[in-house]
Amino acid sequence: MTLPRTAADVLADHVTMELECIDRMYLNVYVPKLAFADGIAHFFRTHRGQPFVSSALMDPITKGFVAAIHRFVTTEGVDLVPFRKGERKDDVAHAYLADHDGSEQILFVGRAQEKTNVFRTQRRHNPITGKAYPWLVADTSMVNHFYFYGFDDDFGPFFIKFATYFPYVAKCCLLTELRDDPLRWLVTVRSRVRTGRAAGSWCVGCCSAGRARANRGPVRAVSAA
């Protein structure tokens, strides 16, 4: 009796080379001690010398941070692009990369409102004295995020996203699928990691895998994202 063959069995007789590569790679950027309420309280009490902790102390830092971003946009002469609802950010990046001269630079800065983890002040009362006191609690909120899209000589297109609310977490993403030569990029990255030329922490994060197979005809790319 002949058993039915799977698609993998059929392809195994025709595939001469198989290569797995990375479509994009994320690095989450944050200060571990500011990821929970006790750490934030310690920061404001010891580092900032505040007698009590409240989310009101975060507002001046936020305003200064946003003002610095706008100064950067003005000083560097890059576009500030508000992302529209439903718009693919990669499509905007494609348009800027099409006119890019290949030099290392920030291409544009994007802005979008997105949900993120935040800390707010909640008023609580001492069960004995009844006196009110502020208490930090974790929450989520829609806040502005700024995307710095750029091009790096070694890693190609990338963006760094900053939240504009304390503790200002960020995310760095290497957009390898936007490169014209993703296979050369993969070899470069592996070489740098093996020789210790790149910091190991940048490759910690989540990534989607892409796969290219070379048949007896031309190479075709199969997206697994």
Image: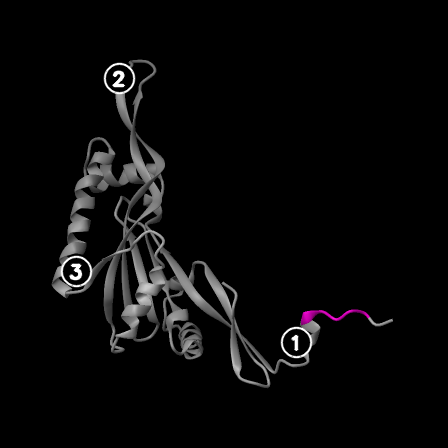
Residue drawn at point x = 41 percent, y = 64 percent: 25
The answer to which image quadrant residue 135 occupies is top left
Circle 2 packing at 10 Å, graded few (<14), some (14-19), many (20+), is few
Amino acid of disc 3: Val
**Crowd tier of the residue under label 1, counting other residues whose Cα lies within 10 Å: few below 14, some 14–19, many 20 or above:** few
Regarding mark 1 in the picture, which secondary structure is present there? helix
- Residue 5: within the magenta? yes
Do we see residue 36 in this rendering? yes
Say the numbered circle drawn on residue 131.
Answer: 2
Q: Element type at marker 2?
A: loop
Q: Main secondary structure of the magenta part?
A: loop
Give the Cα distance between marks 3 and 1: 51 Å
Which of the 4 quarters of the picture holds residue 12?
bottom right
| Location of the N terminus (image quadrant) | bottom right
Q: Is residue 152 visible?
A: no
Magenta stretch: give its range: 3-7
Q: Earlier in the sequence, mark 3 or mark 2?
A: 3
Q: Is residue 148 left or right of residue 198?
A: left
Camera-side mark, 1 or 2: 1
Which residue shows up at 43% across the image and 58% down it?
Answer: 205
Q: Secondary structure at mark 3?
A: helix
First of labels 3, 1 by sequence position: 1
Residue type, label 2: Lys
- Kindly identify the amino acid type of the residue bearing the numbered disc 1: Leu
Q: Is residue 169 above or below residue 134?
A: below
How many angstroms separate mark 1 from mark 2 (CA)? Answer: 73 Å
27 or 91: which is nearer to us?
A: 91
**Pointers 3 and 1 in contact (C-beta within 8 Å):** no
**Mark 1 sits on what residue?**
11
